[in-house]
Amino acid sequence: MENMFMRVDEVMRELGVSESYAYKLIRKLNRELAKTGCVTIAGRIDRKFFYEHFYGTQAYEGRK
């Protein structure tokens, strides 16, 4: 089973951004998620929420 959360290194790889920018994005996404009443973990982002936000899907299916 795939991990529920993405860490900064996965976000960096997925988006091709620096570590500091990946942390900035994670903080932004976690603030949005917290507004919905979800509990968040610093430095990690819910995988499903990440893919919904960036790709409009619940899982990465290999964009071409």
Image (spheres, rainbow, N blue to C red):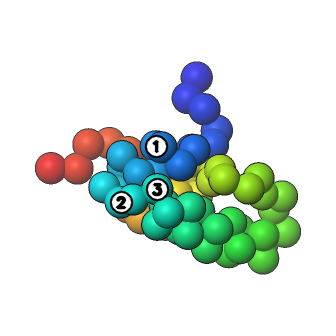
Q: Nearer the viewer, residue 18 or 42?
A: 18
- Secondary structure at badge 1 equals helix
Q: Earlier in the sequence, mark 2 or mark 1?
A: 1
In screen coordinates, is 6 left or right of 13? right
The vertical placement of 60 against 56, above or below, is above
The vertical placement of 33 against 40, above or below, is below
Please provide percent x and percent y for residue 25.
Answer: 53, 68
Q: Earlier in the sequence, mark 1 or mark 3?
A: 1
On the rendered image, what quadrant is the N terminus found in? Answer: top right
- Disc number lying in front (1 or 3): 3
Q: Residue at image x 32%, y 42%?
A: 61
Please provide percent x and percent y for residue 5.
Answer: 63, 43
Q: Nearer the viewer, residue 12 or 36?
A: 12
Label 1 – label 3 distance at C-alpha: 10 Å
The kind of residue on which mark 1 rests is Glu
Q: Which residue is mark 2?
A: 17
The vertical placement of 42 against 33, above or below, is above
Contact (CB < 8 A) between labels 1 and 3? no
The kind of residue on which mark 2 rests is Val
Q: Which residue is mark 3?
A: 19
Q: Which residue is mark 1?
A: 10
In screen coordinates, is 61 left or right of 5? left
Q: Residue at image x 81%, y 62%?
A: 38
Please provide percent x and percent y for residue 23.
Answer: 56, 61
Question: Dot 2: within a 10 Å radius of its alpha carbon, few (fewer than 14), some, or many (20 or more) residues?
Answer: some
Residue 16 lies in what quarter of the image? Answer: bottom left
The kind of residue on which mark 3 rests is Glu
Label 2 – label 3 distance at C-alpha: 7 Å
